[in-house]
Amino acid sequence: MRSLPRWLLSVVLLSGPLLLRAEEPVRVFAAASLTNALNDVAGRWQDSDHPAPGLTYAASSTLARQIEAGAPADLFASADLAWMDYLEKRGKIASATRVNLLGNELVLIVPKGRRFPVEMKAGFDFAGAFKGKLCTGESGVVPVGIYAKQSLEALGWWAPLQGRIVGTDDVRTALAFVERGECPVGIVYATDAAISDKVEILDRFPAHTHKPIVYPFALVKNARPEARVLLDYLKTSPDATAVFSRHGFVLLKQ
């Protein structure tokens, strides 16, 4: 078998890393609550002859700190404005690409078949309405926990529950605790409750009790060009918007 000419071999060796880089997937860091919806959108994206994106899910706080530390990401989708602001102030995202894409609702959940009476208003003895722990995201850093604390404080329920609130790493972990019955009550997003057949929504928190739940998306600084194409797809594609709607997210006006 004839060997390649030396000049052609050099071209192949030099261009190899570039070809490998071009084939690398767009790296998406997204809030855990987006898992099911973005997985479905990624499938539609692939059906349109695009390579599968690399999807990493965790709490927005965890992902933001990883990006700040230099983790390889092209697109960041946060479950609140604060963690996107955090990265923008540190010059880690392309500010011009930032868009508030989705909204959500905050709900009170219980294991299936374990409902109890509750009134979503100040003055109701919520702490006395159930025994055991309440699970939600860590109230100091995880978006769902931050929203939960805002609502509990607005209703006057936070102080009576001190010592009974379990803060988790992300919203899906809180959901799992309630699914297993380890927590008789949880606070998650409506979209998370909707994916589980092991929990039911006890009630929804009034919107005025917490800041609006907004999911901003933005490209990370020096993102590869394909990431911009994916972000545009998420913003404008009827397929993508249909998936987000089906999963219960509110589509915000651009």
Image: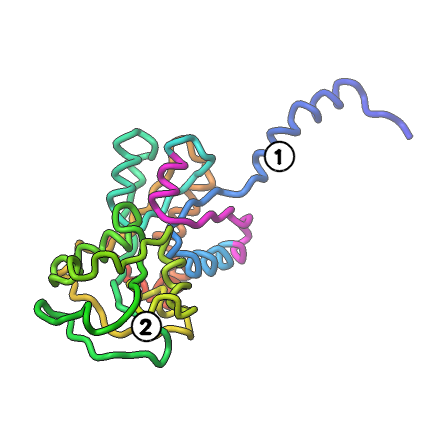
Say which residue label 2 marks. Answer: 110
Q: Nearer the viewer, residue 7 or 182?
A: 182
* x, y percent for residue 147: 22, 55
Q: Quadrant of residue 106?
A: bottom left
* x, y percent for residue 11: 69, 23
Q: Secondary structure at mark 1?
A: helix
Q: Residue at x 18, y 69 (%)?
A: 126
Please name the amino acid that badge 2 sits on: Val
Please name the amino acid that badge 1 sits on: Leu
Q: Residue at x 75, y 23 (%)?
A: 9
Q: Nearer the viewer, residue 8 or 45?
A: 45
Question: Vertically, is 205 above or below 221?
Answer: below
Query: In the rendered structure, which disc, 2 or 1, sits on the residue that comes first in sequence?
Result: 1
Say which residue label 1 marks. Answer: 20
Residue 161 shown left or right of residue 133 in the figure: left
Q: Residue at x 12, y 71 (%)?
A: 124
